[in-house]
Amino acid sequence: MASPILQLRTVVCSFLEAATSHPNLSFSYAYREAPLWPALRTYTSRSFAARTPTDNGLRGSQANVDVETSESVHPQRRAQRIFAARVERALVEAINYDMRLRSGLVESYGFTVHAVRVTGDRLHATVLWDCRRHPPSLTDTCSLTLKRYEQLIRMRLAKALQAREVPILKWRHMALDEHDQHSLTLIQQIERERELERGSPAGEKC
C-alpha cells in the first residue's frame, strides 16, 4: 500500500493534468510562471521519501541540506541578504568593541571580515575573513586564536543581535585580491600619516 504522501501526490498530479486539459479550468494554471507538478514531485521525493525516521521534524541544514553545497548559492532571497548584512554589522561591532577580541584579533593580526553568508534557514553563517598582515604563519596563528575566541564571539554576537538563537559560525579564510590589497595599503598609509601629524608638536608643522 502506498504512503499517504504518495497518494496525495498522485491525486494532485492527476487534478493538475485534468485542469490543464480542461478549457474552463486551464486559465488558473496558464498564468503561473512554472508548472506545479514538477515542484510537487521534487518536494515530496526529496523532503519525505529520502528522509530517515530520525530526520522528521528537522529543517534545512539540520536535515538533508548540505551546508557546503548551499554556500555557493546563498544569499538568494532579499530576507537572506538583509539578515546576512545584519549579522556582519553585529559581528564587526562585537569584535571591535570588545577589548579582548580587539586586542587579540584586530590589533595583533589585522583581522578583517569581508562578508557573511547565511543559509536559507538562518542556522548557519559562513564568515569570510582575512589578516592584513600576510605571512602564512600569522594567518595560521590568527586562525587558532579565532577558534579560541569562538564562544566569546557567539556571546557578543547574540548580545549585538538581541537574539537568543544565533547562527552557527563557520570561519573561512579568504585573501584579498591585488586591487583590494592596494586600497587597504593606501588606507593604512593615510592612517599612519595622520597619527604622525597628531603626535608631532604644533610648532613643527609646516
Image: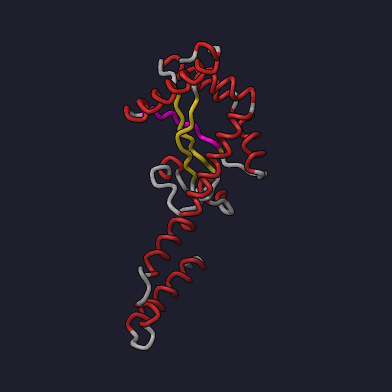
* Residue name at image x 55 percent, y 25 percent: 147
Whether 154 is drawn above or below 41: the answer is above
With 87 as the anchor, is 115 left or right in this view? left
Whether 205 is drawn above or below 19: the answer is above
Quadrant for the C terminus, please. top left
Q: Residue 23 lies in what quarter of the image?
A: bottom left
Does 175 lie within the magenta span?
A: yes
Instruction: Give whichever of 156, 185 is nearer the camera.
Output: 185
Residue 42 horizontal/vertical position (percent): 40, 60
Q: How many marks?
A: 0
With 21 as the anchor, is 188 left or right in this view? right
Does 86 lie within the magenta span?
A: no
Residue 65 horizontal/vertical position (percent): 46, 47
Magenta extent: 169-176
Instruction: Give whichever of 26, 163 is nearer the camera.
Output: 163
Please identify the dominant SS of the magenta region: strand
Residue found farthest to the bottom: 24
Residue 101 horizontal/vertical position (percent): 60, 25
With 42 as the anchor, is 154 left or right in this view? right
